[in-house]
Image (cartoon, helix red, strand yellow):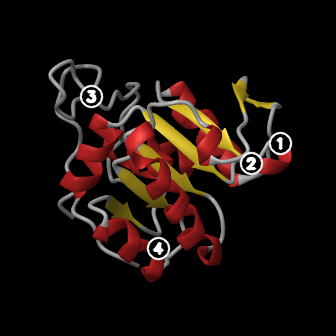
Amino acid sequence: MPQYPDELIKSILRSSRHIAMVGASGNDMRPSYFAMKYLLDKGFRIRPVNPGLAGKKILNQEVYASLKDVPAPIDIVDIFRGAEFAPRIVAEALEERERLGIKVVWMQLGIVSEEAAKLAEDAGLTVIMDRCPKIEYGRFCGELGWMGINRKVIDNRKPKLFSKGGSLMREDKRPAPRRDD
């Protein structure tokens, strides 16, 4: 699995609010649906991209056939398709980069494409592979404990990822747990 510094992931999640989710599914049993619901609940603006569902809605969000149809702005192109599709998706993202303002290409868990990563990085985009923004967001704000992931912290307070100043902070104004171990 590619390694990325926590500060890079935090920085992306702090500065990005608009995500084009390529491969979004209307099936509530699919990982993209669950990730989309979670990120919408956290205040992200999600633009689902799925040519088979274009013109319909997923979680009250209009579905687009391709990145060419998505309205601006888009900070992150989140790829929920197989690695074999990633280079083509990145090529389309690069065509739309200026119009949409794309800064990051994010490939979901299990998706690693060195070819797609090289295309994006050569164009100056940040690339994250084999990670999920929903999981990373939850990890940094301490919400993964309810999913059975042992963070070695027992707490009944609802976590909040960011303070008004942009630093990682809990809702009760205490710093979020550190991930040193």
Q: Which mark is residue 50?
A: 2
Three-letter amino acid code at disc 4?
Answer: Ala
Q: Residue at x 22, y 54 (%)?
A: 8
Mark 1 vs 2: CB contact within 8 A = yes
Q: Where does the C terminus fall, quadrant-wise?
A: bottom left
- Tag in front: 3 or 1: 1
Three-letter amino acid code at disc 2?
Answer: Asn
Q: Position of residue 12 (x, y in %)?
A: 30, 46
Residue holding disc 4: 116
Q: How far apart in space, not on screen, are marks 1 and 2 (Cα)?
A: 5 Å
Three-letter amino acid code at disc 1?
Answer: Leu
Q: Position of residue 144 (x, y in %)?
A: 46, 47
Residue 179 vs residue 25, the one in the foreground: 25
Is residue 35 depicted above or below 122 in this figure? above
5 to the left or right of 36: left
Three-letter amino acid code at disc 3?
Answer: Phe
Q: How far apart in space, not on screen, are marks 2 and 4 (Cα)?
A: 19 Å
Q: Which element is circle 4 on?
A: helix
Residue 144 vs residue 11, the one in the foreground: 11
Q: Which element is circle 1 on?
A: helix
Residue holding disc 1: 53
Mark 2 or mark 4, earlier in chain: 2
Residue holding disc 3: 162
Q: How far apart in space, not on screen, are marks 4 and 1 (Cα)?
A: 25 Å
